[in-house]
């Protein structure tokens, strides 16, 4: 890996291209490096994973709306929309929009947590859409996904956005642009311009993940993917971008992040080096924010040791700074304790998730969030007894470089009215690569079958899985098969009310 030091340029100084992070990302994108078998297999896993969670969300309101908007932009030689007849094609940026919302809606696909949060699977919908439009083959798409994951993971390792209340999709725009550069075989100059535009247009505040979390949480990554496609299109036509976008006097680092004296280090693969970052990412077994995953597993383990949940007087969770402040009581969000809160808010409330997991011993992407489930008096009582506390050791482990030390869990202490205490701790979710039951191909396939059951006919499930597992072998022009058709006609579903289009 080659370390790139990122500093704002001094007033009056002109920063050479070779010193700019956007140029380093562009050079990475433009180099052709064939992925290892291990990387190819993981790309297939994540394509299946995305399809699984998209299938389960096809009739949810944000997905219906995004699909209706996409259908207003038909293009006969365009891209597929998940769930629709493959003969119905739309403009690629709008296919990426509709499919990106479907993938993100349930908060149920892969994650990477470091200095910044990320859901690298958000790169896949725009890459697939453009690959379909451009007639690329499976090997091209695999290389593109490997590049996009590499860029997003490396940016998340090196540059924290949330410390300055900037949303994590600011790393997604550049990663999609870089992946598209690899997909289309673009020169570094073109990718450089697209990366700059993508970053410039996808910086937004984290209010989308604070307070009453809205449906925009599902749209934000899809918007970044759509913006990146449009930026690449403009760059291919000769248009340019603000530069230096990261290091400029009024650039992202100086004005939105650590300021004029900032110093970040982003490590990227050197010439000829494999893009292996996808292997460091991990998916979800449960439909909830990633930092709640381990606690759902821990609750399942602890509940048999608590004879009467009604006798619980307090539940104290000792965890990392991130978990405490993002989904815990350290967030300061009263909405996280409100039975009337949105689903998006509830899946970002560790207090709610832990209470329901203790009561039910399981987790479901719909039933666990139903209005009836959230408003049960006994659930609300238990939920409001949960508090989180930042623990320096769990914070240290959250940021640990050694994967054997890295942890996204914590310690739970349950006090009962008779004075007894039940406590336990967990470092990582069971499905994590170092967890009790790590996900492999069989688990990804099972997740797809479970979430698409009743939505996609069994024969269509098997056709899609066969296509996905042969991804690297698919010839140019064959990627239209990398979609699936729902068993019911989704075209007439446009939600209550109409928009402008």
Image (cartoon, rainbow, N blue to C red):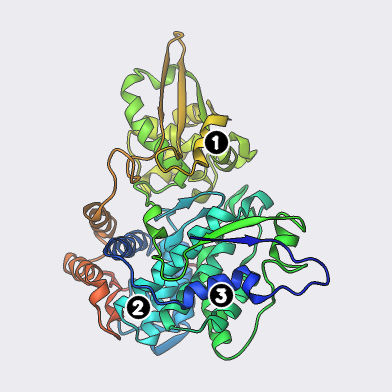
Q: Nearer the viewer, residue 424 or 35?
A: 35
Dividing the picture into quarters, in which one does residue 100 lie?
bottom left
Q: Nearer the viewer, residue 243 or 53?
A: 243
Q: CA distance from mark 3 to mark 1?
A: 34 Å
**Lower sequence index among marks 2 and 3:** 2
Q: Label 3: which residue?
A: 227
Q: Secondary structure at mark 3?
A: helix
Please provide percent x and percent y for residue 442: 21, 54
Q: Residues within 10 Å of mark 2 (few under 14, many from 20)?
A: many
Q: CB atoms at circles 3 and 1 under 8 Å apart?
A: no
326 is higher (above) or lower (below) than 112 = above
Q: Label 1: which residue?
A: 395
Q: Nearer the viewer, residue 49 or 43?
A: 43
| Position of the C terminus by quadrant | bottom right
The residue located at (33%, 71%) in the rendering is 83
Q: Secondary structure at mark 2?
A: helix
**Left or right of residue 96: residue 4:** right
Of circles 3 and 1, which is in front? 1
* Residue 490 in sight in this render: no
**Lower sequence index among marks 1 and 2:** 2
Please provide percent x and percent y for residue 338: 56, 39
**Left or right of residue 87: residue 408:** right
Q: How many marks?
A: 3
Of circles 2 and 3, which is in front? 2
Q: Label 2: which residue?
A: 140
**Lower sequence index among marks 3 and 1:** 3
């Amino acid at each position: 890996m080659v370390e790139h030091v990122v500093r704002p340029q001094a007033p009056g100084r002109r920063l050479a291209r070779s010193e700019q992070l956007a140029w380093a990302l562009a050079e990475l994108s433009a180099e052709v490096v064939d992925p290892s078998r291990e990387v190819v297999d993981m790309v297939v896993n994540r394509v299946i994973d995305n399809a699984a969670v998209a299938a389960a969300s096809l009739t949810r309101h944000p997905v219906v709306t995004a699909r209706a908007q996409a259908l207003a932009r038909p293009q006969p030689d365009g891209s597929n929309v998940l769930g629709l007849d493959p003969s119905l094609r739309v403009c690629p940026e709008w296919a990426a929009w509709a499919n990106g919302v479907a993938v993100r809606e349930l908060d149920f696909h892969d994650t990477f947590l470091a200095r910044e949060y990320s859901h690298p699977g958000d790169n896949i919908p725009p890459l697939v859409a453009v690959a379909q439009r451009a007639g690329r083959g499976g090997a091209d798409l695999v290389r593109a996904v490997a590049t996009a994951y590499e860029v997003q993971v490396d940016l998340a390792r090196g540059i924290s956005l949330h410390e300055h209340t900037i949303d994590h999709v600011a790393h997604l725009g550049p990663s999609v642009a870089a992946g598209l550069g690899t997909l289309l075989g673009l020169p570094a100059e073109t990718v450089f311009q697209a990366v700059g535009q993508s970053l410039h247009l996808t910086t937004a505040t984290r209010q989308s993940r604070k307070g009453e979390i809205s449906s925009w949480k599902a749209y934000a990554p899809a918007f970044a993917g759509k913006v990146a496609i449009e930026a690449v299109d403009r760059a291919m036509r000769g248009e340019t971008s603000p530069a230096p976008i990261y290091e400029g006097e009024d650039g992202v680092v100086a004005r939105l992040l650590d300021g004029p004296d900032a110093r970040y280090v982003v490590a990227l693969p050197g010439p000829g080096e494999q893009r292996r970052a996808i292997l460091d990412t991990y998916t979800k077994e449960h439909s909830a924010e990633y930092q709640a995953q381990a606690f759902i597993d821990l609750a399942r383990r602890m509940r048999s040791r608590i004879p009467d949940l009604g006798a619980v007087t307090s539940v104290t969770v000792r965890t990392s700074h991130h978990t405490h402040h993002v989904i815990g009581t350290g967030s300061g969000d009263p909405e996280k304790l409100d039975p009337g809160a949105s689903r998006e808010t509830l899946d970002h409330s560790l207090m709610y998730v832990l209470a329901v997991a203790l009561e039910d011993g399981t987790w479901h992407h719909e039933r666990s969030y139903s209005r009836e489930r959230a408003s049960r008096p006994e659930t609300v009582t238990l939920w409001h007894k949960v508090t989180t506390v930042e623990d320096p050791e769990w914070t240290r482990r959250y940021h640990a470089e050694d994967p054997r030390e890295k942890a996204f869990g914590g310690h739970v202490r349950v006090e009962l009215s008779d004075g007894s205490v039940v406590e336990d701790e967990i470092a990582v979710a069971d499905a994590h690569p170092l967890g009790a039951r790590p996900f492999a191909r069989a688990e990804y396939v099972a997740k797809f079958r479970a979430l698409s059951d009743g939505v996609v006919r069994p024969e269509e499930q098997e056709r899609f899985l066969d296509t996905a597992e042969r991804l690297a072998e698919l010839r140019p022009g064959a990627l239209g098969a990398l979609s699936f058709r729902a068993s019911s006609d989704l075209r007439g579903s446009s939600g209550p009310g109409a928009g402008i289009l």
